[in-house]
Amino acid sequence: MKDIHFWGGVGWIAALVLIALLGDRRGLLRTARDLERLQPSRLNVGQKINALLSAAFALLFLASGLLLHFGEQDTRFRWASTVVLHDGLLYASLVLLTGHLYLALIHPATRHSLRGMTTGKVSEEWARRHYPRWFQP
């Protein structure tokens, strides 16, 4: 089970690296620039906070996971709070995931956005209400 967990983590990080290298780099750079300002634009503030936390968690999961893995073979990599950090990230990630699912599937004001994520289309009325900047010249 430990090996499945480790290689699943390696696969997750590898997938993120492949997306960064082979994906739409201009789009990723546009999104990164958009994340620098915590003002609504293409993404709302909640989406920006979620993206920033997800990126930070990915780096912290990678660092703590590698320390845990290599710490089993060499005591130089054993740090006292690494397990606490790794486990804490799990619980914080679960809270973010639960909130994300609630907003996407249940909350009436944001549930419509799921259609936009799955089909790429939302009603003009919904877009005007939630993203008025999309309509500004």
Image: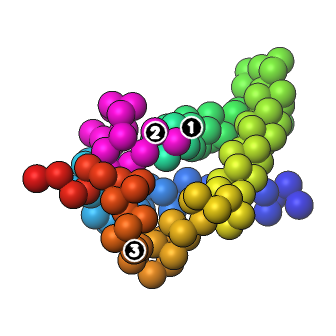
What is the distance, in whole Å, between disc 3 and disc 1 at their CAs? 29 Å
Q: Residue at x 61, y 38 (%)?
A: 57
Residue 79, placed above or below residue 68: above
What is the distance, in whole Å, between disc 1 and disc 2 at their CAs? 12 Å
Three-letter code, disc 1? Leu
User: 10 Å neighbourhood of mark 2: few (<14), some, or many (≥20)?
Assistant: some
Residue 77 is situated, as x and y percent measured from the top left of the image, at 73, 25
Residue 110 is situated, as x and y percent measured from the top left of the image, at 57, 59
Res 123 label = 3
- Label pair 3/1, CB-CB below 8 angstroms: no
User: Which stretch did the figure color magenta?
Assistant: 32-46
**Residue 40: in magenta span:** yes
Q: Residue at x 17, y 52 (%)?
A: 136
**Residue 129: in magenta span:** no
User: 10 Å neighbourhood of mark 3: few (<14), some, or many (≥20)?
Assistant: few
- Label pair 3/2, CB-CB below 8 angstroms: no
Under circle 2, the secondary element is helix
Under circle 1, the secondary element is helix
What is the distance, in whole Å, between disc 3 and disc 2 at their CAs? 21 Å
Outermost residue, right side = 1
Q: Residue at x 21, y 57 (%)?
A: 135
User: 10 Å neighbourhood of mark 1: few (<14), some, or many (≥20)?
Assistant: some
Residue, disc 1? 53
Q: Residue at x 10, y 53 (%)?
A: 137
Three-letter code, disc 3? Ser
The picture quadrant where one finds residue 76 is top right
The picture quadrant where one finds residue 19 is bottom left
Residue, disc 2? 45
Query: Tag 2 or tag 3, which sits nearer the N-term?
Result: 2
Q: Nearer the viewer, residue 2 or 97?
A: 97
Query: Tag 1 or tag 3, which sits nearer the N-term?
Result: 1
